[in-house]
Amino acid sequence: NKNALNPYNSGKLVKGYDFHQKIKDSILFTTEKRRAKRQWAHPILWNALVRASSKVQATYGTQYKLYVGDLSNQHGGKMSNHKSHQMGIDADIGFYSRKVPAPTRFYGALVYNKNKGPTKVDARPQSVYGTINRSSTSYAMPKYFDLEMNALYLDELFKDPKVNKIFLDTPLVMAMREWINNNKPDDYSTLQDAIKQRRLKTGGLPGHHNHYHIRMHIPV
């Protein structure tokens, strides 16, 4: 049942579903009214999000929710402020945070020097186990990026074979890897494999300092 067609940056969504009301009604997620026309998706994306968040809530409590941003337009195609998000298989999802358990927007887990910024790969601050080595990080990570909860979330997502890759800014990937190695090296094996395979990555898409960009495989 081919619901999504064409490459990631030039596709369309066929027989997608409007998940905005489901997101609003769900105990797993939060969102905003302004996203109402931008939360259409293929069911495989919705199923992956629900399964992973259900695992986190079962482990840490139903007070912890994820903020859901843009998915796709009703018929897919070009969406403002995005190159992809065209086939209902891309999602912008916030982070789990103990400080803000039910966020109503994205919270940045990294604070960048305004003169360098995340678009310059060689200028990104380096991870120093769970924080970024700048004084301003007291306002960001780990306050808005709980390493343990997010590790479980990512591990559950990558257990779904339909998940292709997840984009996340490099210092957060580094911090995640370091935290696992120092605390639970025998756990999160699926996530550890994904990091080694560079399926949890920033690559040429910097700027994912306040949300995950989750991308599914194209359905066939």
Image (spheres, rainbow, N blue to C red):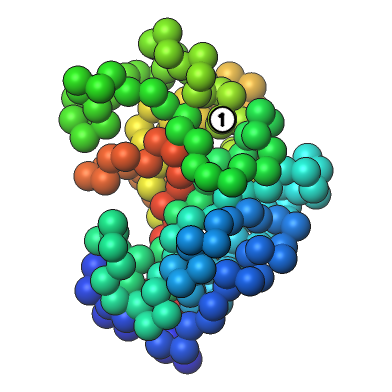
Residue at image mark 1: 144
In this picture, residue 165 sits left or right of residue 36: left
Q: Quadrant of residue 103?
A: top right
Q: Position of residue 183 (x, y in %)?
A: 64, 22
In this picture, residue 206 sits left or right of residue 91: left
Q: Quadrant of residue 47?
A: bottom right
For residue 170, say whether it is visible.
yes
Front residue of this view, candidates 107 and 178? 107
Front residue of this view, candidates 37 and 125? 37
Furthest residue toward front: 33
Whether residue 78 is situated above or below residue 68 in the rendered picture:
below
For residue 189, say whether it is visible.
no
Q: Position of residue 54 (x, y in %)?
A: 73, 56
In the picture, which quadrant includes the C terminus?
bottom left
Q: Residue at x 78, y 43 (%)?
A: 63
Q: Residue at x 37, y 41 (%)?
A: 208
Q: Residue at x 56, y 31 (%)?
A: 145
Front residue of this view, candidates 20 and 62? 20
